[in-house]
Image: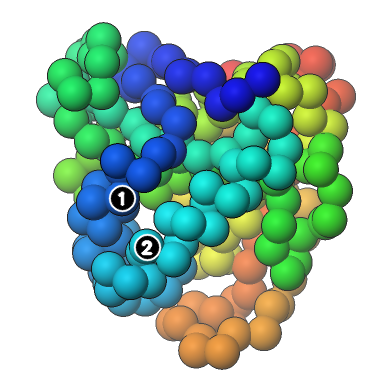
Amino acid sequence: MVQPILRSARLLMVPLADRHLELEVQLDSDPEVLRYLFGRARSRDEVAASHAGRLGLAEKVDGLGFWMAFGTDGGARGSVRPAREEDGDFVGLMMLPPAHGPDQPDDPTVADLGYRLSRRCWGRGLASEASRILLRHAFDTVGQARVIAQTMTVNAGSRRVLEAVGMRHVRTYFPSWDDPLPGTEQGEVEYEMTRGMWQAGRIR
């Protein structure tokens, strides 16, 4: 199985490829998009290194990886998904790689859910819409045992998304930061969706 194209009502989600690098650079040029990740915009070289790392991670577990999301009118409410990526507007980067971080399990049956949206697309419910599709893909297609998501405790917007799609808070932890951001003193939170939760219909 290769990473498939994923579709929701408003989004066309295409597996990340080298042709998407400039869109990643554009996304990471906005410090507000990276407020709870790096606290600043990233250089092109930094983004290129992350891009290469993502492509490598996408090869570790068949079906997991990263997707670039496209919508009509930026995924405006009431819009329909474009038929092709070239017909749509870039919305953001949607993530479902195998768990790989220093505070994550080394277990190929656990995936790490994430999303990074262009600021103009905020507030439209697109992160929740994409997350539901990624969770369905993780459990129904790839066969994962668990999906986790991590964010800063103070990132209220991201936490609302995770709760809206039915994930549950499992822990608050305090990683070591080389360059602490405002709010890091409150730690990070981890949410999860297990296969049992999925099968019980907890997702909405």
Q: Picture coordinates of residue 162 (x, y %)? A: 57, 41
- Residue 77 occupies which quadrant of the picture? top left
Which numbered marker is on residue 116? none
The amino acid type found where label 2 is placed reads Ala
Q: Which residue is mark 2?
A: 48
What residue is shown at x 80% (from left), y 16% (from top)? 199
Of 1 and 6, nearer the camera is 1
For label 2, the crowd category at 10 Å Cα-Cα, with few meaning under 14, some 14 to 19 and many 20 or more, is some
Instruction: Give the structural element (helix, strand or loop) at label 1.
Output: helix
Residue 176 in the figure: left or right of residue 32: right
Camera-nearest residue between 176 and 17: 17
Residue lying at 78% horizontally and 30% vertically, measured from the top left: 144
Left or right, 73 with respect to 171, comes to left
Q: Residue at x 49, y 78 (%)?
A: 183
Q: Is residue 22 above or below residue 130?
A: below
Secondary structure beneath disc 2?
A: helix
Residue 118 to residue 124: above or below: below
- Is tag 2's residue or tag 1's residue first in the polypeptide sequence? 1
Of residue 138 and residue 78, the one placed in the foreground of this image is 138
Is 16 on the left-hand or right-hand side of 131?
A: left
Determine contact: label 2, label 1, CB under 8 Å: yes
Query: Which residue was labeled with disc 1?
Result: 21
Evaluate whether residue 194 shows in this view.
no
Name the quadrant containing residue 108: top right
Quadrant for the N terminus, please.
top right
Q: Position of residue 138 (x, y in %)?
A: 68, 27
Rendered location of residue 48, percent (x, y): 37, 62
- Identify which amino acid the numbered label 1 is placed on: Leu
Question: x, y percentage for residue 28?
Answer: 29, 61
